[in-house]
Amino acid sequence: MASRRSVAVRIRGREFRILTDGGEERLQRVAGLVEQTMARVERGTGAVDTLDVALLAALNLARELLELRDEGGAPAAAMDADRLRSLVEQAESALAG
């Protein structure tokens, strides 16, 4: 079993130390995806509150994950993806309006 180690990642200007038993490069890619998603949400909604941006980014990433799972043929994931898409659209509308 691989040993866990602490890796520093930077998201939205803040450093986080994450324990991982995976590779540092992969964790940096994950952090980069979170950073990109948060920036896209911020641009798309005009939201400035970090918590709002983080929540919407999490919803977007969860929706994308469920859509990928759905491509594998899981019908329950399709319903979850539709629900998440609706929630994301509602949250973005509320923040924009």
Image (cartoon, rainbow, N blue to C red):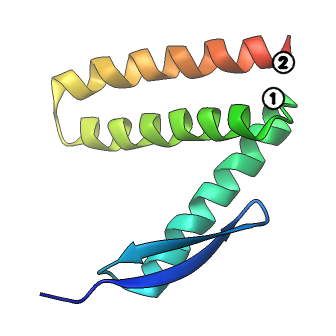
Q: Locate the C terminus and report the quarter of the image it occupies.
A: top right
Q: Nearer the viewer, residue 51 or 78?
A: 51
Residue 96 shows which numbered tag? 2
Q: Are marks 2 and 1 in contact (CB under 8 Å)?
A: yes
Q: Quadrant of the N terminus?
A: bottom left
Q: Position of residue 31 (x, y in %)?
A: 57, 66
- Residue at screen point 40% across, 75% down: 19
Residue 44 percent location from the top left of the image: 80, 34
Residue 56 is left or right of residue 18, and the answer is: right
User: Residue at left 53%, top 16%?
Assistant: 87
Relative placement, left or right, of 48 versus 20 is: right
Amino acid tagged 2: Ala
Q: Residue 50: which quarter of the image?
A: top right
Residue 55 position by quadrant? top right
Q: Residues within 10 Å of mark 1 (few under 14, many from 20)?
A: some
- Of the two numbered discs 2 and 1 on the same chain, state the one appearing first in sequence: 1
Residue 95 in percent (x, y) is at: 79, 18
| Element at label 2 | helix
Which residue position is annotated with label 1?
A: 45
